[in-house]
Amino acid sequence: MSLPRLCRLMYLDSPVRQSDRAGGFTESWLELGTMWCDVLVRNGGATVQGGAPVSAVRYMVTVRPAPMGHPERPMAGQRFRDGTRHFHIRAVAERAGIGSFLVCFVDEEVAV
């Protein structure tokens, strides 16, 4: 098993809910910091959301490890951001083998 190539700098964002003062909320994103990542394509396909065609691609994003509960450890529900591209984190697992890394399973959806 080879070591990941952490050569892509991406931002880690976390969702923040704010009251809209009418009983609901709005959601925005708070930038937590940057991480060096290794990004590998897993699979992809096309779907329809709200009547519009969407290209959905799944990736594995590998990052340096951080202990559970540490603010630099990615979590499901957060996202990685690279420019205007958003990679939504669905699950995080520890990578077995050489050098403990974290593997984040992410989705990127783009309207076509």
Image (spheres, rainbow, N blue to C red):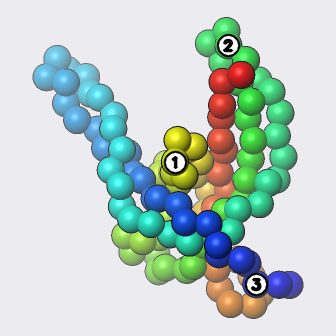
Q: Which residue is mark 2?
A: 52
Labels 2 and 1: the sequence-earlier one: 2
Q: Tell me if 4 is positioned left or right of 106 in this view.
A: right
Q: Which residue is mark 3?
A: 3
Categorize mark 2 by other alpha carbons within 10 Å: few (<14), some (14-19), many (20+): few
Please, what is the three-letter code of the amino acid marked with disc 1? Gly
Q: Tell me if 86 is positioned left or right of 96 in this view.
A: left
Q: Identify the image quadrant of residue 22.
A: top left
Please, what is the three-letter code of the amino acid marked with disc 2? Ala
- Find residue 104 and report its horizontal and vertical position in percent: 63, 62
Q: Which residue is mark 1?
A: 83
Q: Tell me if 66 is positioned left or right of 31 in this view.
A: right
Of residues 13 and 100, the one nearer the viewer is 13
Secondary structure of the residue carrying numbered label 2: strand
Distance between the alpha carbons at the discs numbered 2 and 1: 23 Å
Q: Which callout, 2 or 1, points to the residue nearer the camera?
A: 1
Secondary structure of the residue carrying numbered label 3: loop
Q: Identify the image quadrant of residue 49.
A: top right
Q: Is residue 61 visible?
A: yes
Labels 1 and 3: the sequence-earlier one: 3
Q: Is residue 103 visible?
A: no
Secondary structure of the residue carrying numbered label 1: loop
